[in-house]
Image (tube, rainbow, N blue to C red):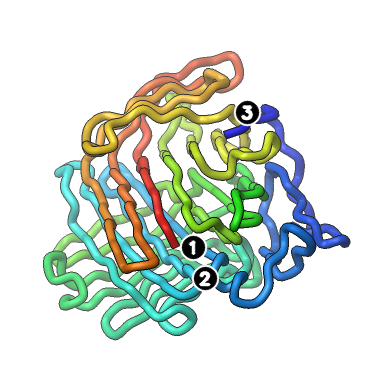
Amino acid sequence: MVETVHNERLEKVPNAMVDRLGAARIGTYRGELSAVQLDRLRGAEGLEGAAALMRRKRWQYSAICTDEIFIAQAIVHAGYAAHTFMYAVDLLEERPVLRFGGLGVPGLQVEVGDRPGVGLAAHYRRPGAHLYTRREPRGAPYEMGGRLGAWAAPASGKTDFRAELHTRGAAPALTVISPVPAPGRINVTQKWTALPVKGHLKVGSRSYRLDGGLGALDYTQGYLGRQTAWRWAMGMGRLPDGRRLGLNLVEGFNDTHPTANENALWVGEELIGLGRARFAFEKNHPERPWEVQTTCGRVRLGFRSIFVHREVRNLGPVRSYFIQPAGVFEGEVRVGSTSYAVRLVGVTEDQDIWW
């Protein structure tokens, strides 16, 4: 990890991620990138043929929380492999009410397009199951949803989920273009949290209104290395004065260049860059408390897990250790010269994958 050149106010995102000579515009930006253009990279940053297919990974992770429910959904296209998951945690009863996951055929059952903003298209389809996050070309709100037959998630029951994540009046997205260790090349991520939400979730006999909730989006695509590992935290809530508050922190990924840094706060209509993140937790017991903070001193939070989503697989050349606890952050966040006691709902994550 390289220490960041810390800028709370970020430059506007470029019109394209690649310049006219084929070099990636490395950096941390505010705003939505129109498209990821890995095929335009040239020189040491570019890949072609089978190497490009093997190293190109892309995913869309989306989440929503209200006072009652936390919902997470991921659609992952790893080139020669693909999978999805979705779960929902009742925050009042502190237990999961939905768990679903599955593998899929890349490009047929699972797809993640090249546009992280307007025109986003990410879906998973199989008989009895359809999950998606998308945004129409006209620039409407993001749509997140899914339909699961009763047999697809038998412990939960038939599921119908539809939501809109609105960008109007929200703080801008965070876009990071970063080098990654060889044999990877470049990674692009667009993060967005604390977006106003409307919608509903029905799971079996349970119904949840999502109006007034908050949403988060994580679009990532890149030529990644054989091994990819990180620690991640995402949380959403409100400050005592009612302003929407979102948090994104990562350690071990997108942090090998001083100007690439995806640690940020979304406060009302403002996006604020942060210093590097530090995570403390028990790797063998991720259900136990975590601590997360930033080197700039603006974030100091403890995290209590309610439910732990686990995906540990050994499929020969593909081996994954993916642990994502969902729960509650509590602690202190400093905005400007004022420190606030906060409570956020979200996730932490510990991932180490060979692919």
Instruction: Name the residue beneath numbered marker 3.
Output: 3
Residue under label 2, please give it: 112
Between disc 2 and disc 3, the foreground one is 3
Q: Quadrant of residue 99?
A: bottom left
Residue drawn at point x = 53 percent, y = 64 percent: 57
Q: Is residue 240 above or below residue 244?
A: above
- Amino acid type assigned to the residue bearing label 1 in the image: Trp
Q: Residue at x 36, y 40 (%)?
A: 348
Which SS class for mark 1? strand
How many labels, in total? 3
Q: Is residue 333 above or below residue 2?
A: above
Residue 184 is left or right of residue 46, and the answer is: left
* Left or right position of 13 against 174: right
Q: Which residue extends farthest right?
A: 20
Q: Residue at x 42, y 66 (%)?
A: 75
The CA distance from mark 2 to mark 1 is 6 Å
The circle drawn on residue 226 is none
Q: Given the image, on which type of amino acid does mark 2 rest?
A: Val
Residue at label 1? Answer: 59
Relative depth, front residue between 249 and 163: 249
Secondary element at image label 3: loop
Q: Earlier in the sequence, mark 2 or mark 3?
A: 3
Answer with mark 2 or mark 1, whichever residue precedes in sequence.
1
Q: Secondary structure at mark 2?
A: strand
Q: Callout 3, which amino acid? A: Glu
**Residue 74 sits in quarter:** bottom left
Q: Residues within 10 Å of mark 1 (few under 14, many from 20)?
A: many
Q: Position of residue 59 (x, y in %)?
A: 49, 62
Left or right, residue 94 beside residue 189: left
> Split into 4 quadrants, where in the image is the N terminus?
top right
Distance of label 3 from label 1 (alpha carbons): 27 Å
Q: Are marks 2 and 1 in contact (CB under 8 Å)?
A: yes
